[in-house]
Amino acid sequence: MIWRFIIKRILWMVPFLIAVSMVSFLLIQAPPGDYLTTYIAKLAESNEVMDQASINDLRQRFGLDQSIFVQYWKWISNIVLHGDFGMSFEWRQPVSQLIWERMALTLLLSMATLIFTWAVAFPIGVYSAVRKYSVGDYIATTLGFLGLATPNFLLALILMYIGVVYFGSDVGGLFSDPFKNAPWSWDKVVDLSRHLWLPVVVLGTGSTASLIRIMRANLLDELNKPYVDTARAKGLSEFRLIMKYPVRVALNPFVSTIGWVLPQLVSGAVVTAIVLSLPLSGPLMLQALMSQDMYLAGAFVLMLSSLTVIGMLISDILLVLLDPRVRYE
Amino acid sequence: MSDLSDTSGAATTGADRIAVASQSQLIWWAFRKHKLAMAGLVITVILYLIGAFAEVLSPEDPNDQDRRAVFQPPQMIHFVDTSAGFSIRPYVYAMERHRDPTSLAVTYTASDRKIYLHLFGKGAPYVFWGLIPGDLHLLATEDPSDRVFLFGADRLGRDMFSRVLYGTRISMSIGLVGVAISLILGVTLGGISGYYGGWVDTAIQRVIEFILSLPTIPVWLALAAALPPSWPIYQQYFVITLIISLVGWTELGRVVRGRFLALKNEDFVIAARLDGASEARIIFRHMLPSLTSHIIASLTLAIPLMILAETGLSFLGLGLQPPAISWGVLLKEAQNIRTISQAPWLFIPGLFVVFSVLAFNFLGDGMRDAADPYEQ
Amino acid sequence: MPPIPMSNDMTAAPILRVEDLTVGFSMRQGAYDVVHKINFALHRGKTTCVVGESGSGKSVTARAILNIVPRPGVINGGRILFDPDGTGATDLAALDPRGKAIRAIRGGRIAMIFQEPMSSLSPVHTIGSQIVEAILLHRKVGRKEARAMATDLLAQVEIPDPAKALDRYAFEFSGGMRQRAMIAMALSCRPDVLIADEPTTALDVTTQAEILDLMRGLQRDFGMAIMFITHDMGVVAELADDVVVMEKGRLVEQGNVHQIFSAPQHPYTQRLLASVRRLEEPAAAKVHVSPEARPILAVEGLKLHFHKRAGLFGKGGDTIRAVDGVNLTLHEGEALGIVGESGSGKTTVGRCIAGVYDVTEGRIDFDGRDIARAGKDEVRENRRQIRMIFQDPFASLNPRMTVKQIIAEPLIVNNICSGQELDDRVAGLLTQVGLDPAMRERYPHAFSGGQRQRIVVARAIALGPRVIIADEPTSALDVSIRSQVLDLLLRFQAEMGLSFVFISHDMSVIRYFCDRVAVMYRGRVVEIGKTEQIITDPQHPYTKALLSSVPLSDPRLRGTRQRHRYMGETA
């Protein structure tokens, strides 16, 4: 039963991923003109002029003269079959060389934030619901609202401001200077973990706030259900019965939030990375989008979107494992 | 039946006022009990009034640059003047500009000179809403050559106070316009999905799922990057709003669909059909009134998301472009850590963002709770 | 009269005594009592029924005994003395509601079962794990042993294949099976007292009878005291040794079941019994159809199948045969009952005739025309002639419209009248159904359940129909109001010559109201005939099972009747 559901769900991914790839390609195709027009304009700024022949030559070499369908097909088949994301026009490098480390770090940051978000939101949400209208609940609710209302980048700026003005240190970045371009080593990992907390906090605040509210609301609904009475009438201690029954049931919708928290985190990571100048996908993607470096930008949009689609899949599978009701529908 | 649930009813029976109270009256009574929601309502109304009357409320032209006022700190407004006896009139102390001879850094100190402010005095000319020319300002300096910076000045010496007020207009209205577009998309598609069901429903639900699974910011960035920066402001404004609401409608669509599905099989809707009411009458007379309160609540909760989205996009330089003024455009000035450590008042637009988003959330939460006065 | 099983220790000390118990709800507007100074006692081996209508405070009393009154309720006074061993009483009300002492009693010495068997069991834990948990809490046994005990318990409550049932979830069981599992859980620690809060209200009448049988048997085996909360006087008569009658938070009368039924003292008890007894025979005011009445409505071979979509691309899936070949005839001026349990298809038949659903197969002849295949204009005309009354008077009135708007709606959309005339018509209709026309500007929330049902009736008769489909019009109402609404309908039947298709699960209501009755089971009519004839001499085994399951509201008749079980069903 479970396996059938999971396989079914995985099969559903295929059309979704195809749609994602098409949308990604359309998005990077959307700007009027192409990389060459931007490039020529740039050259023109420095008073260089390209003759039509070499423009045509370049256009052909980049495959920009073909129809959009051919371009898409070439692009996607190379990615799927060879893991080849094309060349970055601007960097004159294969895209795959540019993105993997940044994507890996993005994934790391998103995952770390997801864990942080849950670790914080779960106990606070439970507390808020069980001790409804207590001082702690009011504090949690207020902080939750503030967290919800403060955009990531503003929070990042404020934390940076506090860092510079009160501690005299630049808190941005993911690595200390000596490690910035160093190859991976144990020390670099340690250094990374020292820097990671700030982006995690910046990125996680908003979703933590909404998860607290969701957990609180779910649990409040469940606390009045008759099965809680049943458990209480059994003689279970209040703590055990709350943890075992209503919290367990409220956990299901909570877990299924991965589906939309992950897209939010991936989105937020883009902005956060730009503000805190983190070596993640965000800044490079922004730059690529601005200069119409289409294969680079396309690779990022595709990878980030796929990440969230996979997140949805994971949350659905988790939900099936957790909630027997879903399996029987 | 359990008699536990019935006990709360005892407090509401009897009163004639409640008996003839319509739906909207009941909602309003329920809503009024939420103090935070009422506060949210007041703040929201104030912000929209500010946006509506930005020209009159701001003392300066928001684009007026002043080399001698670069990064001038905010001036406190004083009301009680004791220099020539006791009198109540608003004034600020003029700022003096010093340049450190060695580091060349500029500092400002308050001088003793008072700049008096007129209520509804004449100042920089403007065209109200682009229609009515005027020069009346709520606060104007007595001497037109004096300038007053209540929220300080930015790197070009422009008045942050006036800029924030103008930014309020754009940022707050983007929420409204965006929500209007989302409303049309969400209600139409959600309604079709919920009312007709079947494969139409399945198709629309898949599209919504798909849109929801996309990470919004990369998509917005990619879309926004496609806009030529040379476009006029209003065109940018409209397209940016459109981009934001392309994602925003999905949530609303789901709410509307869910409600439609639930309502369709309600006995009172079936009763209306058996009364002989036409399809249109069933939808507009019997179903929609039950939906509006929920729709309005979801709309209110969608506005802050739009405001945040615009702020984020403009902050990254992909939303509105200067000379357009929005909170996001203003915050873009605060991107550089050196700038903000020198001029922390550049954060003020951020405060406005936080306040407006909070206000909308309180308002929307209160409305959602009050939306169904019959549910306990 | 059969001897009532009496324990020989009538004079023995009660196992639980409730003394001056007061439970209050503290709201922001101030505190008010929901249970006011009540006194009663429970005895080992005896069943005490607490009876009352909704809002009487009976459920709160039950919860107070376990000290689990839900917030904002608080026990404000009185004592609950629990003395299981005769060694001295503990005051349960004085114990810390979260303390160890009361928790050892909850589930261990006093167990409780609830009304909703679906929502009272956790949806995400197996039945077994919930029973094993209760055993482990109160008895010193290992997990394996506990599981073995749980299997035995399930066997005792007659759940088939108990070992497998342990690993299943509540939603995989039918309502009756769930309630059996609940009982197994409650009995797992051999409690001294079992509190049952309307445990059969949500169940069909045949299932109810089985659960009641089961509880009786278990009480014989276990010898515990049972406190049984119900609103149904029939159940009281079937089950109780002692009766406690509650009204609006006060205990108005208590005593032996025979005494209560034969000589009720308090006017409320008298009223309650009278309204039950009234429904035990055909209505006095009933106008009977003349034998030569023409048939007005004929249903032939009616079928309605729903397709449940399943599978990867929505292919396959089950077909639910909600109605599977039904034939009925309704004569002019006649009231035809359709009786059956939930899922029998009786509501669906009614809705097919009213034109809510599109029929899969078959004919519905109304005045010689097949309305199942009517054109648009015809449908409109048919809807004027055939009107419907719904079960839930709260759901069937639009909360956003005033009573006037609601009743006027059919008159407006059919272009019958407008303006002053419309206003007068609405006022007239309200008077006809016994409501004050001055109340027509009010919204439905200002009316009680019975009043709302009168509004529904007014809307139904507004167009001067010839047939009314009444779908369980009284089952959402308290018993004292039921006969009032039925009498109203009877009056219209007499005055306007209306014909009724009257759908109900309640045999007594059918008997009161209907000339003939059709018994439905699983989408088919298994028996049809004159109401009196069916009730006194049922032919089909299902009808026999159904009738023998209806509790008799006379304790003297207890045990005189042979219970039939219809094995075509699975509970």
Image (spheres, coloured by chain):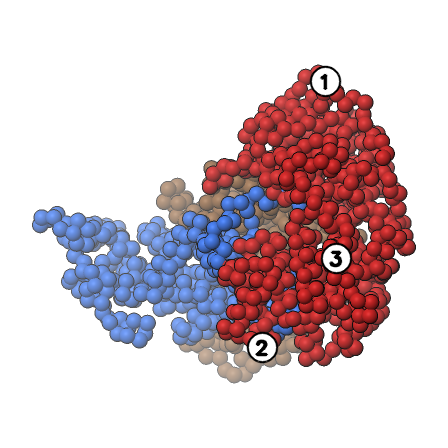
Chain colours: A brown, B blue, C red
Front of the two marks 2 and 1: 2
Going by the numbered disc 3, the residue's amino acid type is Phe
- The residue shown at (84%, 41%) is C159
Q: Earlier in the sequence, mark 2 or mark 1?
A: 1
The subunit letter for the residue under badge 2 reads C
From the viewer's perspective, tell me whether residue B142 is left or right of residue B348: left
- The residue shown at (45%, 54%) is B17
As drawn, the label of residue C415 is: 2
Q: Quadrant of residue C25?
A: top right
Where residue C314 appears, as percent x and y from the top left, is 77, 65
The subunit letter for the residue under badge 3 reads C
Where residue A35 appears, as percent x and y from the top left, is 53, 73
From the viewer's perspective, tell me whether residue C242 is left or right of residue B91: right
Going by the numbered disc 1, the residue's amino acid type is Gly
Front of the two marks 1 and 3: 3
Check disc 1 and report the residue beneath it: C86
**Mark 2 and mark 1: Cα distance apart in space:** 76 Å
Check disc 3 and report the residue beneath it: C513
Q: Nearer the viewer, residue C54 or C529?
A: C529
Q: Residues within 10 Å of mark 3 (few under 14, many from 20)?
A: many
